[in-house]
Image (cartoon, rainbow, N blue to C red):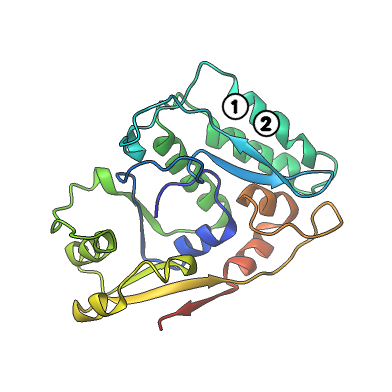
Amino acid sequence: MQPYFFPYIGYFSLIKNCDEYIVFDTPQFMRKGWIERNRIIRRSGGSSYIKVPLIKAPVSTAINEMKINNDSLWKDKILAQLNVYKNKAPYYRIVLDIVKESLDGDFTHIADLNVNILKIVCSYLGIKTKISVYSCMDLQISPPKVADEWALNICQALGASSYINAEGGKNFFDRMKYTRNNVDLCFIKQGVSEYKQLGGKFEPNLSIIDVMMFNSTLKIQKLLDDVSLLNE
């Protein structure tokens, strides 16, 4: 999966249910996605974005080449936006420190920042899955002919017998191609367990920050296990 910025809980459920999680950081960067932004609750209802400003680059730029615009005080802005949880969320202080730790450092590239975030959040949530970064693996794979062969060829190079992706990717992959190559293709379906937010209508699929603000690690572990694997 691509390196998302403080992604939603389903991303972490995927990590937890793998033996090895590979951050796929070499594809072309797609604008207005989840790599440089995510959503948190808004006190008046709905959600708002927290964002990392990026330096403009050619359309063909790879994810791991996208640079952060560190001329702006974006870290301070994000931390200020989290005030929406102050005096409202029971785990505000703890999670604020986690966010500060995740953002701490002189990050030049968004991919490096997001990998750091993933590792720190996983540690807090008790997820012990090995996290690897594709561009750093020096993995020799067969050149993919179409986009869905990246995962297949990486699995073959690693000797993996199964590959798990998010449920939203079901229509992207050719299942028979994986079956012919002895790789079991599965998709993880995240439950829709609600939790108490600020009141009013529950806002689903927000950043993991929102989940951590309102839930203990024990409760989050239960939410992470509220999944099913689909292999058909």
Contact between labelled residues 2 and 1, with CB atoms less than 8 Å apart: yes
The foreground one among 41 and 61 is 61
Density class for disc 1 (Cα within 10 Å; few <14, some 14-19, many ≥20) is: some
- Kind of residue at disc 2: Leu
Lateral position of residue 232 relative to residue 98, left or right:
left
Determine whether the residue tagged by mark 2 lies in a helix, strand or loop.
Answer: helix
Instruction: Give percent across and percent down for residue 81.
Output: 72, 33
How far across and how far down the image is residue 68, in percent?
45, 26
Q: Please tell me which residue is depicted at 41% across the width and 84% down the height of the picture.
A: 232
The one nearer the camera, 75 or 92, is: 75
Task: Name the residue at the front extreme.
Answer: 59
- Please state the horizontal and vertical placement of residue 229, each as a whole percent of the image: 47, 78
Task: Quadrant for residue 162, please give it.
Answer: bottom left
The residue lying at 67 percent from left, 43 percent from top is 95
**Tag 1: amino acid:** Lys
* Quarter of the image that includes the N terminus: bottom left
47 vs 159: above or below: above
Q: How much space separates mark 1 and mark 2, taking CA atoms?
A: 6 Å
User: Which residue is under mark 2?
Assistant: 79
Residue at position x 39%, y 75% from top?
186
Tally the numbered discs.
Answer: 2
**Residue 169's quadrant in the figure?**
bottom left
Observer-nearest of 121 and 164? 164
Name the element at disc 1.
helix
Quadrant in the picture for residue 26: top left
The residue labelled by disc 1 is 75
